[in-house]
Image: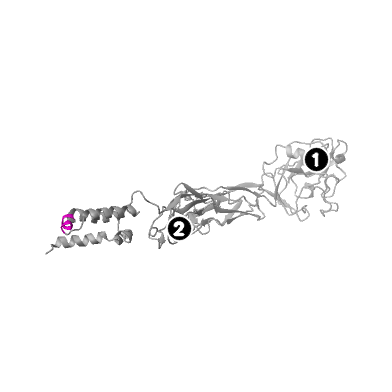
């Protein structure tokens, strides 16, 4: 009677000796496990098998022949396989740089071979094909796969990712189940954290003229970014809104900021000020603390001008109207405000005229007073009067005199704003007389109180800001 060991060894012999075990099932068992079974047979069963007239030498010879002819066991044969070239060192970029690699089979398959292709991170790179198919006709023709870098608009630095070549599917058992090499790449970032502030559209004015500018982010933040805005001088200009925020949804949409000029009712000239953009606050560490550019602008002083009386006397030969203006602009008493251009309130009927018709303000030539404008003393706070729509003022409407001291100044005006005959030969001669006004009256004597010999150096000039 056969022992149990003899029966088991005999069964194992036929199991291992069956060629289908190697040729049909080697894909389902690891090589090491198969040789483990064989080693058990050789070490435990050889004596029992020899007693039953089964030659272990014949089996060992068969096993050697099968293993040498089967690629899964052979150490010198690898005719089937998938070659991927290259598998590393490739670079794409968010600016559109592409990369490529090739895939080819090592031997002709007996059936179509399909290889899936996919990106490990489609936010960084995408592939030109989702699968490749090889046949017995094109197996040795390399198929190229293109990889396109993706712009994610986030300042995330250079990101490594892979193109995954999936498990091969094929009816050819030599190829079915193979896992080709994946391809490693780097997508170069083209984004950086930053805040863009546009130039401002212009200046504001005390008449309510507004100015605008925009703010946007340079890249998508990972968290909300807040920016507050303020005016360096709220008496000259205000800003709306006073705060804005950006998210990953609106980061690249410029937000408009409006600056409105303020009327301070003071003849302070054109005043420069700034719109302050605070440092950004955000949980995104790349944006937190970024300080956007502040903007400078000017609030134009509208409807308010200054006057002053020159600090030095002048003879009637002023060098004409232009000479009188030059005296005003070089005088030490000129207020240091912007605009800093002054003209003398003096007429000759040719180069400068206040009115052709009495008290009408018509036919003016290079006249120094503006319509509907408030005029102040040199201190900028004491208002003298406001002109009418014709750029003259009606006597009796002066709130204050031009100065507190009784100072005469050349004008060449009659009391009704027309040109006097007393103009020192167009203010170019010391012969004859010139008409003068007085600084202290609020009547028409303020522009025409008396005549003065042109060779006298007593009168001054009344200078008016332009």
Q: What crowding class fits label 1: few (fewer than 14 Cα within 10 Å), some (14-19), or many (20 or more)?
A: some
Which mark sits nearer the N-terminus, 2 or 1? 2
Q: Nearer the viewer, residue 351 or 376?
A: 351
- Pick the quarter of the image with the N terminus: bottom left
Disc nearest the viewer among 2 and 1: 2
Q: Which quadrant holds residue 172?
A: bottom left
Q: From the viewer's perspective, is 203 left or right of 53?
A: right
The residue most toward the bottom is 1
Q: Nearer the viewer, residue 102 or 227?
A: 102
Front residue of this view, candidates 346 and 342: 342
Q: Position of residue 24 (x, y in %)?
A: 33, 61
- Which stretch is magenta? 46-51
Spatial CA distance of label 2 from label 1 is 85 Å
Q: Estimate the x, y position of residue 431 in percent, counting from the top left.
A: 88, 36
Residue that carries the numbered disc 2 in the rendered image: 117
Helix, strand or loop at label 1? It is helix
The residue wearing badge 1 is 322
Label 2, residues with CA under 10 Å away: few <14, some 14-19, many ≥20:
many
Q: Is residue 48 magenta?
A: yes
What secondary structure do most residues of the magenta stretch adopt?
helix
Answer whether residue 274 is visible to the viewer in this image: yes
Q: 354 or 350: which is nearer to us?
A: 350
Instruction: Give the left or right position of residue 411, taking residue 246 as reference.
Output: right
Residue 12 in which image quadrant: bottom left
């Amino acid at each position: 009677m056969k022992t149990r060991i003899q029966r088991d060894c005999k069964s194992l012999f036929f199991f291992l000796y069956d060629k289908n075990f190697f040729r049909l099932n080697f894909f389902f068992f690891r090589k090491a496990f198969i040789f483990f079974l064989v080693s058990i047979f050789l070490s435990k069963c050889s004596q029992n098998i020899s007693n039953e007239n089964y030659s272990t030498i014949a089996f060992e010879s068969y096993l050697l022949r099968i293993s040498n002819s089967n690629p899964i066991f052979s150490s010198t044969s690898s005719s089937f396989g998938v070659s991927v070239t290259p598998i590393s060192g490739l670079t794409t970029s968010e600016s559109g740089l592409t990369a490529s690699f090739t895939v080819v089979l090592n031997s002709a398959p007996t059936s179509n071979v399909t290889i899936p292709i996919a990106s490990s991170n489609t936010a960084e790179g995408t592939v030109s094909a989702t699968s490749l198919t090889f046949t017995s006709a094109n197996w040795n023709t390399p198929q190229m796969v293109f990889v396109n870098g993706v712009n994610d608009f986030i300042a995330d630095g250079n990101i490594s990712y892979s193109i995954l070549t999936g498990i091969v599917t094929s009816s050819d058992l030599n190829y079915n189940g193979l896992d080709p090499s994946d391809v490693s790449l780097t997508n170069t970032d083209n984004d950086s954290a930053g805040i863009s502030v546009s130039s401002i559209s212009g200046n504001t004015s005390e008449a309510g003229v507004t100015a605008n500018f925009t703010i946007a982010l340079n890249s998508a933040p990972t968290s909300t970014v807040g920016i507050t805005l303020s005016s360096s001088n709220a008496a000259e200009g205000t800003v709306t809104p006073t705060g804005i925020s950006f998210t990953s949804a609106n980061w690249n949409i410029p937000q408009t900021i409006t600056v409105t000029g303020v009327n301070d009712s003071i003849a302070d000239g054109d005043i420069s000020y700034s719109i302050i953009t605070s440092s950004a606050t955000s949980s995104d560490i790349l944006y937190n603390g970024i300080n956007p550019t502040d903007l400078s602008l000017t609030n134009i002083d509208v409807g308010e001008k200054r006057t002053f009386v020159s600090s030095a006397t002048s003879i009637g030969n002023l060098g004409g109207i232009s000479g009188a203006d030059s005296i005003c602009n070089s005088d030490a008493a000129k207020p240091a405000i912007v605009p800093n251009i002054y003209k003398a309130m003096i007429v000759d009927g040719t180069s400068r005229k206040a009115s052709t018709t009495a008290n009408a303000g018509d036919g003016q030539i290079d006249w120094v007073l503006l319509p509907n404008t408030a005029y102040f003393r040199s201190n900028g706070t004491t208002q003298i009067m406001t002109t009418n729509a014709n750029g003259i003022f009606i006597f009796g409407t002066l709130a204050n005199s031009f100065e507190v001291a009784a100072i005469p100044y050349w004008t060449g005006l009659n009391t009704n704003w027309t040109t006097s005959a007393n103009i020192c030969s167009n203010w170019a001669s010391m012969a004859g007389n010139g008409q003068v006004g007085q600084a202290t009256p609020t009547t028409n004597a303020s522009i025409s109180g008396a005549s003065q010999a042109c060779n006298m150096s007593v009168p001054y000039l009344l200078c008016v800001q332009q």
